[in-house]
Image (cartoon, coloured by chain):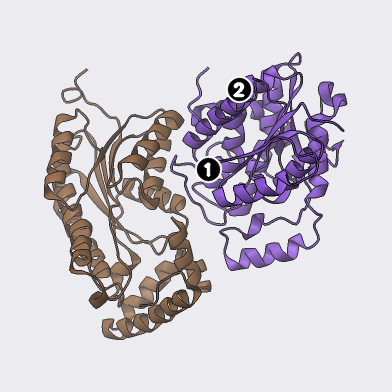
Amino acid sequence: MDLSAKTYVITGATSGIGMAAAEALVRAGAGVIGVGRSAERCRAAEAHLRGLALANNVRYVVADLSLQADIHRLGEQIKEMLSSDGTTALDGLVNNAGVFTYWLTLTPDGVETQWAVNHLAPFLLTWELLPLLKAAPFGRVVTVSSGSHYGARLNWADPQLRRRYNGLQAYGNTKLANVLFSLALNHHLGTDSTVRAFAADPGLVKTDIGMKGTPALVRWIWQIRRSGGTSSDVPARSIVFLLTDPSLHTASQVYWKDSLPKQASREALDVQSAARLWELSEKMCGIKE
Amino acid sequence: MNPINSKNKTMMALITGAAGGLGKAFAVECASRGWDLFLTDYLREPLETLAAALRNGYGVKVITHACDLTEAGARARLFEHLRAGSGRFTTLINVAGVDFEGPFFEQSGQQIQTIVRLNIEGTLAMTHAILQYRNPWMPFRIINVASLAAFYPMPVKATYAASKRFLLDFSLALREELRSLNATVTVLCPGGMPTNPECIKAIEAQGWAGLITTLDVGRVANQTLDAALAGKAVVIPGAVNRVLQTFGALVPSSLLAGFIHNRWSAVRQKRVVQGSLPAA
């Protein structure tokens, strides 16, 4: 696979699935713009990827995806990077960054942290980068969802579960929102669009998602649970497939696992919910069409 | 339309300490109910960020005024802003409060003064000022944020706990005085809340006791607002916390102070060992 003329943006690209996907793309000669929260981890990831064979154009941007203002700034920075490369086209965006929080916390924008990072950030960053994605021959938006969307159901009276919080339930809701968002984006773009959105189910992967900022009990449970998981390379392969495979230009399936379409939950494929979530997300991000 | 002459029935809340964990949760809760807001906090930037997001997300009017409530001059400018504005308030939520870690003799005079000035003086001044700007056609609700610490003498948090005790007694007394004005006072006495990484570390250091006494801010804000609208006197969120309060009331204060001292010293020691607190 030769991707030397392509450029992809990956969020949460300093560890776990995001890092593995960045590595796979870099090995195929693609240009990669990684996004991470910590400047130090970004520098380390950038140095590592630049050392790989075929490494072409690897750059990292530091951004805190829990802040809407930072997402706007990130969008601008990516535009500037591409224009300094002499292009206005972006071939793909991987909305991979995700968090799990045991307690309810609110971002400076007053949004529940998982809802902000796992759902609103993909929505807003995609919105910011959409003109660039449309300028590519085929633009792809891959959002990393999860099997934990099965059984989740959005409560429209309190979608962020602010009033009755349960960390796992809130996580499942954001992963459900990832599928609904992909569905709504395809609908919003229309069938003629060159841009396609997919939700990727990574399966159970040995990552650190349950280890960051959670109580000892949660860390312990996650340590046991992830021991049965796969390496990050498995979902990374599937993400690269969704970003690059030409057969997907006309694919109608939205939810994918291991490079194959998979049946998402009924809630996740509800077109009306998708439209409602889109409208709510626009409002929460201050987007007016 | 002149809101002073018309019977404006818009809900409008003033929230102090609105950029912090619990204050922000109250602001979001009020906005989600469609209430207009006047937000104040010591920090200007997070206040503006929150206000912009609430205007977008909930379509409510939000006024901000950054203010250090420990300064009489700054408070006067805030009250001038209230006077000049046409808003008529239906709710006051006094969240602004502060504590500094450590035993009394390790705190600076400045720190002790700040606790008293913000927790007590700031709350009294705000409450006193806003009563004249309340909406006369609506019941007026005051929520004062005390703490579970208000019920006990608390070694290592001596000044803080006593300042919260002041707010508890003051609120209960004021509540009776304000009945004739169609105003109610509700005092919130929460346990620890996981509002920032520091708080979360402190809660974790308490082990299982921290886990079962801790409540999410969103739920606390929601329950407290409902309780205030129903005119309740005291809100103690969480069943475990209510049990603690009941048992605490049965034990002589001096015994309780000794017990709490032992427990907090152990927790503090654990945090020093873990490196989340500097060794004193």
Q: Is residue B235 above or below residue A267?
A: below
Instruction: Measure the alpha-carbon separation of dots 1 and 2.
Output: 23 Å
Screen quadrant of the N terminus of chain A: top right
- The residue type indicated by label 2 comes to Ser
The image position of residue B238, as x and y in percent, is: 45, 62
The image position of residue A127, as x and y in percent, is: 59, 26
Q: Tell us which disc is closer to us: 1 or 2.
A: 2
Instruction: Tell me: B58 left or right of A100.
Output: left
Chain for disc number 2: A
- The residue type indicated by label 1 comes to Asp
- Whether residue A270 is visible, yes or no, is no
- Whether residue B137 is visible, yes or no, is yes
Residue position for label 1: A64
Look at the numbered discs 1 and 2 and tell me whether their residues touch, using CB distance below 8 Å.
no
Crowding at mark 2 (Cα within 10 Å: few <14, some 14-19, many 20+): few
- Residue name at image x 23 percent, y 77 percent: B105
Which callout, 1 or 2, points at the residue further toward the start of the chain?
A: 1
Q: Quadrant of residue A117?
A: top right
- Residue name at image x 42 percent, y 68 percent: B241
- Residue name at image x 75 percent, y 42 percent: A21
The image position of residue A23, as x and y in percent, is: 76, 44
Q: Which chain is the one coloured brown?
A: B
Chain for disc number 1: A
**Residue farthest toward the top in the current orientation of the protein:** A192
Q: What secondary structure is found at the residue carrying circle 2?
A: helix
- Residue name at image x 68 percent, y 21 percent: A89
The image position of residue A109, as x and y in percent, is: 44, 39
Instruction: Tell me: A115 left or right of B279.
Output: right
Please tell me which residue lies in front, B48 or B140: B48
Q: Which chain is the one coloured purple?
A: A
Q: Is residue A200 above or below residue B56?
A: below
Residue position for label 2: A83
